[in-house]
Amino acid sequence: AVDPSREILTSVRFSCLGASQHGAYARLARRRALALPMLAVAAVVSVTQGRFDWARIALGPVAPTPFRSARAEASLALAPATAQSIARAAQLASEEAQPRSSILRGTREYRKEMVQVLVRRVLSEATGLDQA
């Protein structure tokens, strides 16, 4: 029998993004601190004719484990690709985040606010709205 605690991940496979799909990543960390981020956000979106087909938004470390913001993703499904839709998704992601205060990573309140900032930033970058 194989002991699952002794298994090692040796590869990861994923599909390439299609023409209407784009992604972005942002990380918040103190420059002179350890490599521990205060917050990291990644997003991949599919936008067709000015509307989100779908979105995937992953956050960490603002909960016991990294997670996808299901409420934020759902709010973007078929929504117009606008700053207002992105702001709503960022708010929902912040509500889902459950960070704890940490000497190394900052207060709970600061980190929840920064979830909104970084989610808006990565979604804007992924949709091309940051260039407008």
Image (cartoon, grey):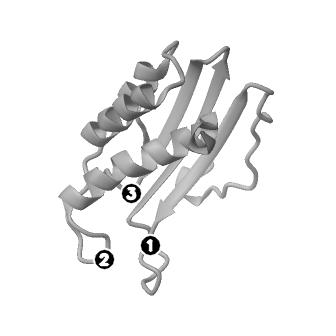
Callout 1: SS? loop
Image location (x, y in percent) of residue 48? 68, 17
- Say if residue 53 shows up in the picture: yes
> Who comes first in sequence, dot 3 or dot 1?
1
Q: Mark 3 and mark 1 in contact? Answer it, CB < 8 Å.
A: yes
Q: Mark 2 and mark 3 in contact? Answer it, CB < 8 Å.
A: no
In the image, taking residue 41 as reference, residue 132 lies left or right, namely right
Which amino acid, by three-letter code, is at mark 1?
Answer: Leu
Residue displayed at 25% across by 48% down? 98
Residue displayed at 51% across by 17% down? 80
Residue displayed at 60% across by 39% down? 132
Image location (x, y in percent) of residue 49? 67, 14
Q: Nearer the viewer, residue 88 or 98?
A: 88
Image location (x, y in percent) of residue 93? 35, 38
In the image, which disc is placed on residue 36? 1
Image location (x, y in percent) of residue 76? 47, 22
Quadrant in the picture for residue 38: bottom left
- Say if residue 1 shows up in the picture: no
In the image, taking residue 74 as reference, residue 92 lies left or right, namely left
Callout 3: SS? loop
Q: Mark 1 and mark 2 in contact? Answer it, CB < 8 Å.
A: yes
Residue displayed at 44% across by 42% down? 120
Q: Which residue is mark 3?
A: 61
Which amino acid, by three-letter code, is at mark 2?
Answer: Leu
Quadrant in the picture for residue 111: bottom left
Which amino acid, by three-letter code, is at mark 3?
Answer: Pro
Q: Which residue is mark 2?
A: 104
> Who comes first in sequence, dot 2 or dot 3?
3
Q: Count all numbered tags in the image, as a single digit.
A: 3
